[in-house]
Image (cartoon, grey):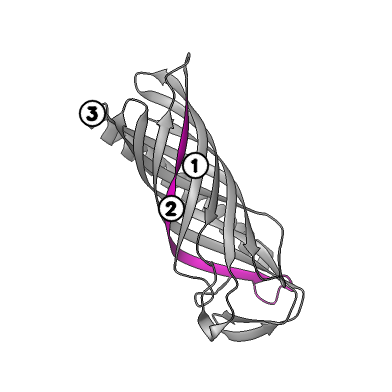
């Protein structure tokens, strides 16, 4: 029964992301059609990424990579022909796995529990993020324009879930264990492929890493300095 519920939840998440992307695409296209300022460009993208956790605590070991995805809308303001400030909003489903080699006290929704040494916890996290960055573009070469975008993401946690490797806990909320806010830096390297007028197909490879400890100081635990990382492939349209 649990497996069937998990599969159903995964299908629902995929549909939610598709609908969000479609809404963002229609929204940005409508705004772009009304907004004729050549200094402003809208981009709608969706990504597939691999996430992992890293801790400075030697008793905590990074586990397997975790697959995730997001949908995002960006607005670029070109203050020079090849330079722009980029501001966006994205809904990100991410996470990772961490193995705890010592007995570990965890605050689940149902209460505290001490996990056996060697237990792996799968973190399933949803964020609303606001990325802000600087985008530098080349001149158009044939139909291609290449760019690099680097900056900071302001991350607001909306849903923290966890599952344990012994399957005692499956998709249980862990609100007290994960910080509600985080900061990350991002680096995107990509290209625009012109489709005519100002419309373009966009493709990029992205890396993101958080600045702040993912875990909270609930229970006054020693600092774990756990970081969330991910590498993504992004596709979308620019208008």
Q: Nearer the viewer, residue 133 or 5?
A: 133
Magenta span includes 200:
no
Q: Secondary structure at mark 3?
A: loop
The circle on residue 153 is 2
The circle on residue 198 is none
Residues tagged 3 and 2 counted as in contact (Cβ below 8 A): no
Q: Position of residue 193 (x, y in %)?
A: 47, 23
Relative to 174, is 191 above or below?
Answer: above
The circle on residue 46 is 1
Q: Disc 1 to disc 2, how far (Cα)? A: 16 Å
Q: What range of the chain is rendered magenta?
A: 146-171
Name the residue rendered at 37%, 27% in the picture: 82
Viewed as shown, does residue 44 lie left or right of 80? right
Q: Disc 3 to disc 2, how far (Cα)? A: 26 Å
Question: What is the chief secondary structure element of the magenta stretch?
Answer: strand
Q: Nearer the viewer, residue 46 or 212?
A: 212
User: For mark 3, what is the residue?
Assistant: 37
Foreground label between 1 and 3? 3
Name the residue rendered at 36%, 41% in the picture: 86
Q: Position of residue 81 (x, y in %)?
A: 33, 25
């Amino acid at each position: 029964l649990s497996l069937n519920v998990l599969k159903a939840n995964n299908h629902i998440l995929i549909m939610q992301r598709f609908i969000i992307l479609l809404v963002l695409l229609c929204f940005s296209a409508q705004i772009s059609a009304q907004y004729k300022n050549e200094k402003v460009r809208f981009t709608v993208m969706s990504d597939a990424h691999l996430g992992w956790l890293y801790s400075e605590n030697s008793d905590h070991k990074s586990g397997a990579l975790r697959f995730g995805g997001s949908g995002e809308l960006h607005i670029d303001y070109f203050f020079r022909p090849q330079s722009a400030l980029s501001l966006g909003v994205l809904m990100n489903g991410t996470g990772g796995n961490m193995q705890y080699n010592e007995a570990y006290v965890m605050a689940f929704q149902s209460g505290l529990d001490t996990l056996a040494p060697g237990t792996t916890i799968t973190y399933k996290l949803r964020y609303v993020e606001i990325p802000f960055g600087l985008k530098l573009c080349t001149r158009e070469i044939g139909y291609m324009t290449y760019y690099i975008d680097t900056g900071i993401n302001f991350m607001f946690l909306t849903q923290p879930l966890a599952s344990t490797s012994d399957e005692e806990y499956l998709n249980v909320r862990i609100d007290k264990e994960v910080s509600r806010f985080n900061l990350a830096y991002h680096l995107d390297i990509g290209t625009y492929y012109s489709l005519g007028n100002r419309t373009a197909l966009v493709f990029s490879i992205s890396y993101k890493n958080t600045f702040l400890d993912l875990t909270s100081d609930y229970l006054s635990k020693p600092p774990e300095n756990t970081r969330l990382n991910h590498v993504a492939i992004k596709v979308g349209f620019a208008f």
